[in-house]
Amino acid sequence: MKSTLAFATLVASVFAAAEVNDVSVNGTPQEDRDGIIGLTRNSTCKNGGKMEMVNVMLDKDEHPDALQLLSRLGRALDDDGVFAVHDNPAWTVIQMNATEECMKVLDGMAEVSVVERETKVQSFVTQKDTAPWGLQRLSNEAGASGDPQGQNFIYSFEDDKLGAGVDVYVIDTGVRVSHAVFGGRAVEGFSFEGTAADGDGHGTHVAGTAAGQRFGVAQNANIIAVKVLGDDGSGSSSNTIAGMNWVINNHIKRKAQPGFVGSIMQMSWGLQTIAATVDQAIEGAIDQGIHVSVAAGNDGADACRISPSHLGGANSAVVTVGSVNITNSVSTFSNVGSCVDIFAPGEKILSAWNVGDTVINFLSGTSMATPMNSGVMATLMQADPAGLGQNPAALKAKLLSMGRKNVIGGNLRGSPNLLLSNGVDGKVPTTSKRSAEERRTVTGSPAAWAKDMVTNLGQRWVIESTDSPVRHF
């Protein structure tokens, strides 16, 4: 179906001049092999004018053929300025340079769903300070309180499989897959450059919270690094689309493999606007049975104004996650509104870091809350693979039904008063001083771990910093 995006800087006209000719045999118009009267090789899309990078999403209902469409535009896949064709059962995207006139031509084609200029993507990190108190918060009715760095925190759960068989695709800055917390469960998957190694730290921290031992929620899930952001934490909509294309195709391959439960796309980043190509790519992934967990954003504003967070709420099966602090108050930086589905611990979170296999670091942001949610999703999928493993709508409904209601303070501004829960009440007093051994697994006191340099993984931990970088995007 045709759904044309109106560009802020592009006149929404589909009647731009183009060289259009019927293909004919003996004077009789003929249809091309896709059942559409074809354009001849169109010079408007080949020559002249200022070129800009665009994502052209094709409409599979119109029987598109990417290479044929390029040919009709006078272009080819090996031309300068035609960068890639990404194809999967959900959608096809051509990434190419185009003039404004060419964009208008593309916008008028029945085979084209969306034409959109490339947009900037940024990871969501902000604030500073310490400690992964969040595991107790999501598994304890009474929550956690006090100094998040100085007390013992207890993580309670019912099933020690903790997400086994679930693939968590960390679509981010890459992941240090050799880090001790991953125990061989992390691999490099896709990268927009040579390697999926993490030169920023954001992706490694996110992966550790979602599925790392000691610090993470789903401690037996698989972690797959999908690098779409650079070492400065930023990237492009084109790279994210390429990464999601790889995820969809890899997910389809994994369906035939024994022990596979399902896939989660963990996305702690956002654009500066709403991008229809990115949105449709995500919705296509959901149609393939892939679960999607996204950050609400860190502007203290309405999450409905940017992609992909605006897909949350009643809009789709995407789960959009806001941040709270240890007192259960909405973080001052967290985006809010009707597109936020649930809140999770996002301040003073300790997790893996990218500069060494035993280095850990403290970060805050909706980026840190989102992998908490992804981890809980993984544990629910593993517990009910037939019902929830590849059914995003059912999993979202289950997740929200388990959330702790009306415990969040602060200005929700239209957000649901719902706090992430793994469905367990550890019955831990918030002032508990009990030892780690009194629960099945714990977070303990991170400051003490680093000081003593002893953990249950037999590793010596080094704290990178007790300050987080401040990155507002």
Image: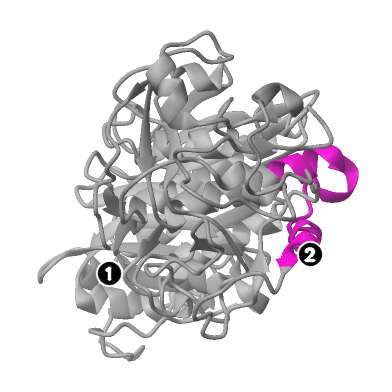
* Vertical side of 428 occupied by 449: above or below: above
Of 435 and 307, which appears nearest the observer?
435
Tell me the number on the disc at residue 42. Answer: 1
Per the model, the C-alpha gap separating discs 2 and 1 is 48 Å
Q: Is residue 320 left or right of residue 363?
A: right
Q: Residues within 10 Å of mark 2 (few under 14, many from 20)?
A: few
Q: Is residue 441 visible?
A: yes
Q: Residue furthest top?
A: 458
Residue kind at label 1, given as amino acid type: Asn
The main secondary structure of the magenta stretch is: helix
- Helix, strand or loop at mark 1: loop
- The magenta span reads 377-404
Q: Is residue 467 left or right of residue 246?
A: left
Residue that mark 2 sits on: 397
Is residue 382 located in the magenta-colored stretch of the structure?
yes
Which of marks 1 and 2 precedes in the sequence?
A: 1
Residue 424: x and y in percent read 80, 47
Q: At 42% from the left edge and 12% from the top edge, which residue is drawn?
A: 460
- Helix, strand or loop at mark 2: helix
Of 19 and 13, which appears nearest the observer?
13
Q: At 33% from the left edge and 46% from the top edge, which residue is drawn?
A: 129
